[in-house]
Image (cartoon, rainbow, N blue to C red):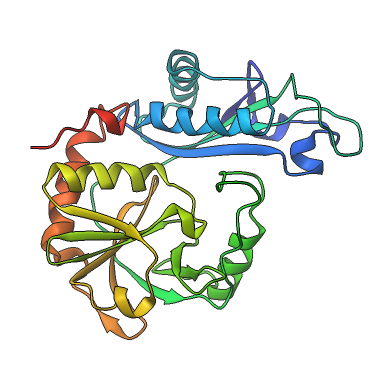
Amino acid sequence: MLIYLNGQFIKIEDARISPFDHGFLYGIGLFETFRVYDGHPFLLDDHLERLNQGLAELSIQQQYTRKEINNILQELLEKNQLTNAYIRLNVSAGLGEVGLQVEPYLQPNLIIFPKPLPPAGELIEKKAVLLKVKRNSPEGNQRLKSHHYLNNVLAKREIGNQPDVEGIFLNEQGYLAEGIVSNLFWIKENVLYTPTIQTGILNGITRQFVIQLARKNNLQVQEGFYSIEQALKADEMFVTNSIQEIVPITCFDGHSFPGEKGDYLQLLHQDYRQYCKYLWSRNSVRRE
């Protein structure tokens, strides 16, 4: 498997970065994960928008365009003979002295990792469990998709390697937050509920896309501070991320849900299948 590293396509085993990279020393780096469907990088514009905003906040003086990244992706896919793939796009701060730096980073490292995936389409149900580990507060004004991932690692260790289970965080104030690698949604009657980003969650790209899909289908959307008791009254529940897409939840804290049989979930899933092979941004979704 070949990866992309700073202008070169190289074998995984040949990849090298300096131990003085501040992404390694101090966690100053960002990443995006997304899927390629039949050669199309789904919602790439949205991922790059979030990435570029985060780079500016971290004083990493680099911005990436659709054309630049898509050109790299297409060559990377061709060299690896992939049409459907998991992509991780990683930007680390680059070289610096030992010690905290206040000056901007001028030469970040760009690494793009591909991984083969089968064609998407099948809904895969999961159970949700409440985590003992609490969601930590963001280091700044909002949560970045950064190298600082210890909170998620500790949560994953709590539930272990159970592919059919997603752990759900409460934040430090006891409100529902998000999954270990997902955002949380539930539906009651014709209202889609999801925790507000003010709970400290990552504003997931798929989260934003699903909110657009819900509004397109005339669902009301409410973002707020919710207790687990409120969520357990739901008619349907699911979690989302850019690789697993929309994941139906069958049970949470002893309460059962219809999982993949949910009417609204089926509707959102059908829309997802329609858009994933050509959409660059959620902003192109229009209300019916």
| Image quadrant where one finds the C terminus | top left
Task: Report x, y in % for residue 260.
Answer: 19, 64
**Residue 274 against residue 151 in the figure, above or below:** above
**Whether residue 11 is visible:** yes
Residue at position x 23%, y 47% in the image: 121
**Residue 197 against residue 66 in the figure, above or below:** below
Task: Report x, y in % for residue 283.
Answer: 28, 30
Q: Answer with left or right where residue 33 lies relative to residue 9.
A: left
**Residue 82 against residue 136 in the figure, above or below:** above
Residue at position x 58%, y 28% in the image: 2
| Image quadrant where one finds the N terminus | top right
**Residue found at the far left of this picture:** 288
**Residue found at the far right of this picture:** 98
Q: Answer with left or right where residue 234 lies relative to residue 264.
A: right
Nearer to me, 65 or 134:
134
**Residue 199 against residue 14 in the figure, above or below:** below
Nearer to me, 208 or 82:
208
Task: Report x, y in % for residue 131.
Answer: 51, 75
**Whether residue 120 is visible:** no
Q: Within the image, what quadrant is residue 120 found in?
A: top left
Residue at position x 92%, y 37% in the image: 98
Task: Report x, y in % for residue 257.
Answer: 22, 75
Q: How many marks?
A: 0
Nearer to me, 1 or 128:
128
